Image (cartoon, rainbow, N blue to C red):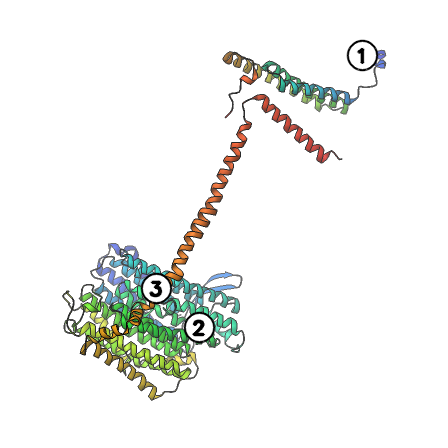
């Protein structure tokens, strides 16, 4: 036994300590509980993985039978294989760095212990999700991280926008979770089990055509779940709003770990998806569309966190593209590298915001290169990583996906390349607007403390060198499948696209600062459309939110609740009163009238008795 | 009863005669209750109905050669005596308070 359960147990203990006693503890004690629990968890992951060696097969620990009822037989099991090993390292490693960073970032905020309690709870659920050995345990973690996401987005609950964003994330995720639940029911009915090993064992020998309809349906429903959690079309709308949360939350939950849960789940269900080529095609197309759409929106945003949020949506689209074209290993590779550089982008943005006392608008920044050099350098590392500059991490994983996409359908590659160009442009646009030119704001920028710059430096190293951790090679035996041939010309094209994006950003925002505005005026309506995020929120409001609300008000509240429910209750009361009102006239007070009633009653009874029994 | 007298009468009075008599008495009681307005008359009508029922009990008891009917009629008499005591007391009180024996004048027990 390797005691896998200890991995999520440490953060849970941290959560309990901070959640119950945190209010009365000093900040140092809260820090010790919060960071210590995640550190122990990280060390335990290292120990377990060292003990398990090469992990050719999944290592499973069975704890107890959880639900036993009819065909439902679910036990509480944890498992580690190569896929979850990568995720475990990413989650605990990045989680640890972000916890350390947050001690600096949150030091002036109220609710300090509450923040770390939620963060530890999130770690607990995320690790449960990753370790789960069946769909239901995974779902527990899945819902749990959703809860923590909601709590942390709404952390500044006194701000209405933060509360609304939290609710939006929760509600939108419910739609996805509904699909996921349906998928689980269908899996249970089709395979008689929710256990990963057993389901995949049964689906393995099936021919691709066999039961294709059911498996395709299962996979599409799983995809609905994944689009909710991983912010893909059409359910991505919650993620940009989720930036209302504190920046470490954006980095940990809404960039590095939770939003990749959908990618992880699809990769985990790879044996199912391999039997549903149509569903896989849908995954690729959804991913590609999301990547393009979010990247175009990212080009126009001025809130530094919003830029990175749309970038996250776009990069998640890349991961789904990788999954959809069958390159699961490349998709997970991108999960990891993205966790490095996107966490760094967010933490760097947080450091900028911290330096400027809460300013998030890029138009109010500029020229910060000299004032906060460490933040600038680390953010620059993240930018060149995400822009796909070789030989850094983003280049490695993105090219693995693009090559696989080209092997699948060349047009997907070309769309991906254009998106890569846009990615490079918007990231460097943010960097140039933030750090070059002259300072346009009014605050007094100051460099962040070591607790913040330290994690930034570590993440910068990982962003630059993370590509050399050969994850695809490590994961390939799990997923099998053919490998896309390496084509140097394709790599060169995508690198050139990235370089073009960077140079355009340089031209627009450093060399000729007025050019971008002129161009946006030239594009006119198109620019307005993109700047307003294609009016998707407005569309959803008009098509779904308002009809639902008005329908509920008219039909469910006014119609059903007031009309039928209240009507039945009040009707029963008034019926009794009406009948009583009629009957009370019988009580006249005249004894002889009562006697007459008695006589009439007796006669009626006698007549009835005679009518029924008299025939005998 | 002397033996010569017994021979003059029919072997026995048929049961139906008793029942018809009882029904007539009972109907008189009802009619009296419904149509007379003096409380005492109404009260006597009640007694008449009770005794009509008693007659039925006794007739059936004799006819079926069982003692149950006798016992019942005794119970009815006891209850009737008690009822008479209470009823007369009520009538007296009503008369004292209202100075009337008109039953329709006593109709305040209503909503």
Disc number placed over residue B1 in the picture, else none: 1
Question: Which chain does tag 2 point to?
Answer: A
Nearer the observer: mark 3 or 2; the answer is 3
Residue A53 appears anywhere in the view: no
Disc number placed over residue A269 in the picture, else none: 2
Q: Is residue A600 above or below residue A11?
A: above
State the separation of the CA atoms marked 1 and 2.
Answer: 113 Å
Please, what secondary structure does the residue beneath circle 3 have? helix
Whether pointer 1 and pointer 3 mark residues with C-beta atoms closer than 8 Å, the reply is no
- Identify the image quadrant of residue A483: bottom left
Q: Is residue A506 above or below residue A110?
A: below
- Identify the image quadrant of residue A362: bottom left
Disc number placed over residue A537 in the picture, else none: 3
Nearer the observer: mark 1 or 2; the answer is 2
- Identify the image quadrant of residue A390: bottom left
Question: Residue B47: where, in percent of width, then height?
Answer: 64, 17
Instruction: Name the residue at 65% across, 19% down.
Output: B31
Instruction: Name the residue at 54% across, 24% down.
Output: A588
């Amino acid at each position: 036994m390797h005691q896998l359960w200890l991995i999520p147990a440490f953060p849970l203990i941290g959560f309990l300590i901070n959640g119950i006693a945190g209010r009365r503890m000093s900040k140092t004690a809260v820090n010790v509980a919060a960071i210590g629990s995640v550190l122990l968890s990280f060390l335990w992951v290292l120990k377990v993985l060292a003990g398990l060696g090469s992990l050719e097969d999944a290592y499973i620990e069975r704890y107890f039978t959880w639900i036993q009822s009819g065909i439902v037989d679910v036990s509480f099991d944890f498992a580690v294989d190569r896929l979850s090993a990568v995720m475990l390292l990413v989650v605990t490693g990045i989680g640890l760095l972000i916890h350390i960073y947050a001690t600096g970032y949150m030091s002036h905020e109220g609710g300090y212990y509450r923040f770390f309690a939620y963060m530890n709870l999130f770690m607990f659920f995320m690790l449960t999700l990753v370790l789960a050995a069946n769909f239901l345990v995974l779902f527990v973690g899945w819902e749990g991280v959703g809860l923590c996401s909601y709590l942390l987005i709404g952390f500044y609950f006194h701000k209405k926008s933060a509360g609304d964003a939290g609710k939006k994330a929760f509600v939108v995720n419910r739609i996805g979770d509904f699909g996921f639940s349906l998928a689980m029911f269908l899996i249970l009915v089709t395979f008689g089990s929710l256990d990963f090993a057993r389901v995949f064992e049964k689906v393995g020998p099936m021919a691709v055509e066999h039961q294709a309809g059911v498996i395709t349906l299962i996979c599409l429903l799983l995809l609905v779940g994944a689009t909710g959690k991983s912010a893909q079309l059409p359910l991505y709308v919650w993620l940009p709003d989720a930036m209302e949360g504190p920046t470490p939350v954006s980095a940990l939950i809404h960039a590095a770990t939770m939003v990749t849960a959908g990618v992880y789940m699809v990769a985990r269900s790879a044996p199912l998806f391999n039997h549903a080529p149509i569903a896989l095609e849908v995954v690729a197309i959804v991913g590609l569309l999301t990547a393009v759409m979010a990247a175009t929106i990212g080009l126009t945003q001025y809130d530094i966190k919003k830029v990175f949020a749309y970038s996250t949506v776009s990069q998640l689209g890349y991961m789904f593209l990788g999954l959809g074209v069958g390159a699961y290993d490349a998709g997970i590779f991108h999960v990891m590298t993205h966790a490095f550089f996107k966490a760094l982008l967010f933490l760097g943005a947080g450091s900028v915001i911290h330096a400027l006392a809460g300013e998030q608008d890029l138009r109010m920044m500029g020229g910060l290169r000299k004032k906060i050099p460490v933040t600038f350098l680390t953010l620059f590392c993240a930018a060149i990583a995400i822009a796909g500059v070789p030989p850094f991490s983003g280049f490695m994983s993105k090219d693995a996906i693009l090559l696989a996409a080209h092997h699948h359908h060349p047009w997907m590659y070309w769309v991906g390349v254009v998106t890569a160009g846009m990615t490079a442009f918007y990231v460097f646009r943010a960097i140039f607007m933030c750090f070059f030119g002259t300072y346009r704001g009014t605050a007094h920028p100051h460099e962040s403390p070591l607790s913040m710059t330290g994690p930034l430096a570590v993440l910068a190293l990982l962003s630059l060198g993370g590509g050399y951790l050969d994850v695809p090679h490590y994961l390939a035996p799990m997923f099998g499948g053919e490998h896309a041939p390496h084509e140097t010309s394709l790599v060169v094209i995508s690198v050139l696209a990235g370089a073009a994006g960077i140079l355009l950003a340089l031209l627009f925002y450093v060399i000729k600062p007025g050019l971008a505005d002129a161009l946006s005026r030239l594009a006119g309506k198109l620019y307005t459309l993109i700047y307003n995020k294609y009016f998707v929120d407005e569309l959803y409001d008009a098509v779904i939110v308002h009809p639902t609300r008005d329908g509920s008000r008219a039909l469910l509240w006014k119609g059903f609740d007031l009309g039928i429910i209240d009507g039945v209750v009040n009707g029963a009361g008034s019926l009794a009163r009406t009948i009583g009102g009629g009957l009370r006239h019988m009580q006249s007070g005249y004894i002889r009238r009562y006697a007459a009633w008695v006589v009439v009653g007796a006669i009626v009874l006698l007549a009835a008795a005679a009518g029924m029994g008299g025939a005998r | 009863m002397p033996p010569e007298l017994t021979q003059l009468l029919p072997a026995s009075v048929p049961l139906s005669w008793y029942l018809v008599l009882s029904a007539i008495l009972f109907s008189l009681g009802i009619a009296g209750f419904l149509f007379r307005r003096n409380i005492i008359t109404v009260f006597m009508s009640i007694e008449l109905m009770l005794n009509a029922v008693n007659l039925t009990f006794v007739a059936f008891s004799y006819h079926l050669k069982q003692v149950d009917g006798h016992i019942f009629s005794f119970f009815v008499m006891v209850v009737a005596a008690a009822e008479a005591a209470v009823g007369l007391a009520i009538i007296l009180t009503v008369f004292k308070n209202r100075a009337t024996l008109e039953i329709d004048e006593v109709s305040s027990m209503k909503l």
